[in-house]
Amino acid sequence: MQSTGITSGGKPVTFPQYLLLNARRFADRPAMRFKDYGIWQTWNWAEQMVEVRNLALGLKAMGLGPGDRIAIAGSNRPRLYWAFCAAQSLKAIPVPVYADAVAEEMAYVLDNSGVRFAIVQDQEQVDKIQSMAERIPLLTDIIFDEPRGLRDYDLAKLHDYEAVAESGRAAGADAKAVSDWEAGIAASDGSEISAILYTSGTTGRSKGVMLGAARSVKAAEDTARFDHLDEHDEVLAYLPLAWVGDHYLNYAQGYVSGLCMSCPESPDTVPLNLREIGPTFYFAPPRVFEGLLTSVMIRMEDASGLKKKLFRHFLAVAKAHGEKILEGRPVPLSGRIAYWFGDKIIYGPLRNVLGFTRIRVAYTAGEAIGPDLFSFFRSLGINLKQLYGQTEAFLYVTCQKDGEVRPDTVGPAAPDVEIRIAESGEVQFRSPGMFVGYYNAAEKTAETLTPDGFVMTGDAGIFDAQGHLKIIDRAKDVGKLNSGALFAPKYIENKLKFFPNIKEVVAFGDKRDFGAVMLNIDLTAVGNWAERNNISYGSYQELAGLPQVYEMMRGHVEQTNRDLAAEPMMAGAQIKRFLVLHKELDADDGELTRTQKVRRSFIDERYAPLIAALYDGSSEKYVETEVTFEDGRKGMISATVRIVDVPVFPAAADHREAAE
């Protein structure tokens, strides 16, 4: 095989090749930060290369070799990110697993991918794997990062990360071992599998997406160049390791651009760590931005009357002029002056509180974001953009150019990506980072690809006049009411989730007489409201059933109907009935995926009695629902759920006709 790696002067086609290149060109630049025990620790690229090499040589001594699959499970930790590159340097294949996956989910992924080794964060992950040992027959060794709680375990198949790295450090004392390791990296032509990432499983069993090394590098290079990322940028890596968004935006783009990736102390300290790091590049799914908006609104409810008045006034200024100023469009002098004052006393301090002061580029993806929520953050001066992607694309299918950002589209095709709309309305693409196939599922791969090599996304979309893509919804979820009116549930759900008091929504209406929704309240926001109003409650269930909460939700639904009435295509899909669900939708109960997407088919089955009650005229319905507790035990909760009617409004076209 001809050498194409960096030692022969070629262009890197794998992430380990970029590691060696970065250790030379950015040797003293920070590559990784981690806050541990309250102190930020930093590794430069030269030091990171040594850490990866030590682990790789230690794993090689244990028998890890080309083609072997190695699971990686835990929170965002430098050692777990180093495990990716260490495995790839040996042409082994990392398989990240969601840290919060229950034991059965984890066992499925490890067995399906045929892993031999696993590198995990702590005792929790060890326990989950060992409890399912009989279902993972090929797994031989588990390496743990944090030894706490594992002292009395049988260490025959358990290995301390530090011990493995130390053995690699000893092997690295031999110059030939180091030379052979580097030569092996350089010799790669990028044809191997770089990683297997499992899909979220929204529509069924998760599938292992095989990503090619050279393809992954090319995709990351294109988008890093698109957003001008370089070694001076910094990100906070806080999203799940197993999610394509984290693996691409942090790990992949980090290696090709040389930026610094910072890991938070814990998931609970992410807001604090954001402020401390002040990233220049930021990514979050819509749910995170919804949570940020909720926290802002809660804090303002506790502010003084004067602060509330100023906040409302300058938010109106931002709504009128903020996005135009961000994009360099014309704004009257009076508007610029008003916005300048707002930036000094409201927007700037708010960006600082959120940790967004230094952000050059921010993205959101994972599911559609509500236009109002999107515009809110852009109006504050945050360069938030949307991308549309899939695991099968190694993320990017579209992305928005600076100055061409709109809340109702996800932008044109990303660099070197081809997109087309099939006759059925389905979005199809072909891209540099396109997956090699599904692991051990050739028939599923064939079902996903067209004869000419395009990936069928399952999403319905249209192009606007400027060539920007609009995603309407999952193709199978878009339907029509019995009246013939278009019904796009995700669009309606996002409208409602803009309200800080609403956390989750599931909309119904396809092949029915009218639209209806089930709501989840946001416990933090509504709980804060209840405390301010001296309303006592003992649980989520009790709070969700309060008449005052139903009245609050009724107001939100009515406002959403008014907004839908102003949109001719969606006016017929207004909501006529709603209920507030007696429990939060939970991934542990199978209602959400690990990336927090609603599993609609599961919801339809589990809550069939409540859905039927929405349409049969019932004013309430008694239900019993099984729940999973944090320790894995099952239990039942019961409730009598109220169902409320809400008014609908004449469509905008009707107003125009009346005027004429």
Image (tube, helix red, strand yellow):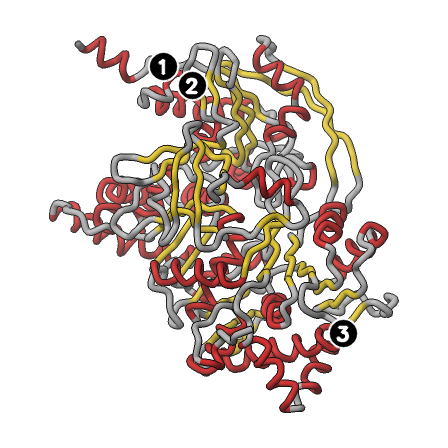
Q: Are marks 2 and 1 in contact (CB under 8 Å)?
A: yes
Q: Nearer the viewer, residue 547 or 586?
A: 586
Query: Residue at the spot x=43%, y=67% of the render?
Result: 234
Q: Can residue 10 be seen at all in this image of the molecule?
A: yes
Q: Which residue type does callout 2 highlight?
A: Gln
Q: Nearer the viewer, residue 478 or 300?
A: 478
Q: Secondary structure at mark 2?
A: loop
The first of marks 2 and 3 along the sequence is 3
Instruction: Name the residue that disc number 3 marks.
Output: 62
* Above or below: residue 388 compared with residue 572: below
How crowded is the residue under tag 1: few (<14 C-alpha within 10 Å), some, or many (20+)? some
Judged left or right of residue 168, residue 355 is left
> Closer to the observer: label 2 or label 3?
3
The first of marks 2 and 1 along the sequence is 2
Residue 116, how many percent across, how many down?
75, 62
Residue 319, how many percent across, how many down?
27, 41
Query: Residue at the spot x=31%, y=22% of the render?
Result: 566
* Above or below: residue 604 compared with residue 60: above
Q: Which mark is residue 293?
A: none
Q: Determine which quarter of the picture holds residue 36.
A: bottom right
Q: Which residue type does callout 3 highlight?
A: Met
The first of marks 3 and 1 along the sequence is 3
Q: Secondary structure at mark 1?
A: loop
* Above or below: residue 444 compared with residue 239: above
Residue 354, how many percent across, how many down?
42, 55
Query: Residue at the spot x=59%, y=77% of the render?
Result: 184
Residue positioned most to the left: 333
Instruction: Name the residue that disc number 2 marks.
Output: 574
Q: Which residue type does callout 1 highlight?
A: Phe
Q: Which mark is residue 649?
A: 1
> Real-space Cα distance between discs 3 and 1?
68 Å
Query: Residue at the spot x=73%, y=35% of the render?
Result: 627
